[in-house]
Amino acid sequence: MFPNLDPLLHSELRLAVMSLLMSADEAEFPYIKEQTGATAGNLSVQIEKLSTAGYIEVEKTFKGKKPCTICRVTPTGLKAFENYVKTLKNYLEVGKK
Amino acid sequence: MFPNLDPLLHSELRLAVMSLLMSADEAEFPYIKEQTGATAGNLSVQIEKLSTAGYIEVEKTFKGKKPCTICRVTPTGLKAFENYVKTLKNYLEVGKK
DNA sequence: GTAAATAAGTTTATTTTATAAACCAAATTA
DNA sequence: TAATTTGGTTTATAAAATAAACTTATTTAC
């Protein structure tokens, strides 16, 4: 009836990050920070978690002389996201079945 | 872009409880426990939170001689749930806009 | 009839998680 | 060259979820 929701995705900020990356394909740290309204510290932690899980890949390069962190969703992350959405529907689609 | 998700509903167990009550109209504690697979303790805590928020109403009666806790969703809870679903769509409907 | 087990919860404690605050290094601006 | 900004990371704190322990009453088994 209520299958488990992937705890890595069932988090407001991590879900927002994934959502952003799903449509943007790739995004830089400051952009994600701005779009989500998260603090840098919180964002850094959550990106690290998504990265550790293999849901996103994180590339640390330079933009001119400034550090630049680029994030991309991986195939694993894509699958996890889709699965999360499907699972969540069991909770949301009340009375539709 | 990513409006805040009602923290009271963005919780696996509480969401499951609400979801159940949305389609069942009213339900007894043991039934909710069985359907969600939650432990009694956890369920008790989460029901209390939903009740305090006014999302559900809890009636404590007796079934013969045994205590019987009945839960129902309130209009406030209904609205909150619907709003949560709407908000969540911003996170889930990637690339559909 | 009484001891053990079950039912229906609640309370308290522990663990996990999210968040914020503090910090760091380099670069830019005043 | 001192102060500020940018782009983060690390560490500490606050909040939340979860589980474990406990309570009270009730059957059920001996």
Image (spheres, coloured by chain):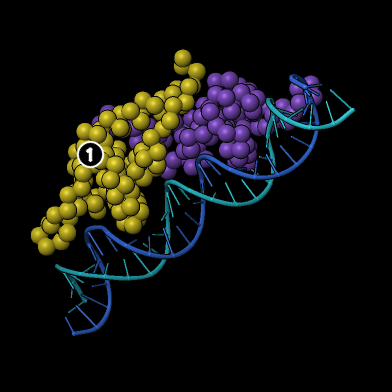
Chain colours: A yellow, B purple, C cyan, D blue
Seen in the image, is A84 located left or right of residue A26?
right
Q: Position of residue B11 (x, y in %)?
A: 48, 38
Seen in the image, is B20 located left or right of residue A47?
right
For residue C20, what is the image quadrant?
Answer: bottom left
Q: Residue at x 61, y 38 (%)?
A: B41
Please indicate, yes or no, whether residue B54 appears anywhere in the rendered image: no
Quadrant in the picture for the N terminus of chain B: top left
Seen in the image, is B23 located left or right of residue B95?
right
Q: Residue at x 10, y 60 (%)?
A: A64
With respect to residue A71, does A92 lie above or below?
A: above
Please give the residue where the numbered disc 1 appears in the rendered image.
A73
In this view, the residue in front, A82 or D21, is D21
In this view, the residue in front, C18 or B53, is C18
For residue A10, what is the image quadrant?
Answer: top left
Identify the element where label 1 is drawn.
Answer: strand
For residue D29, what is the image quadrant?
Answer: top right
Q: Position of residue A80 (x, y in %)?
A: 30, 32
Q: Amino acid at mark 1?
A: Val
Quadrant in the picture for the C terminus of chain B: top left
Q: How many marks?
A: 1
Q: Position of residue B86 (x, y in %)?
A: 42, 31
Q: Residue furthest top?
A: A97
Please indicate, yes or no, whether residue A18 appears anywhere in the rendered image: yes
Q: Residue at x 49, y 42 (%)?
A: B7
Seen in the image, is A8 located left or right of residue B16?
left
Q: Residue at x 17, y 59 (%)?
A: A67
With respect to residue A14, does A91 lie above or below?
A: above
> Chain letter of disc 1?
A
With respect to residue B22, does B84 lie above or below?
A: below
Q: Position of residue B19 (x, y in %)?
A: 52, 26
Q: Residues within 10 Å of mark 1 (few under 14, many from 20)?
A: many
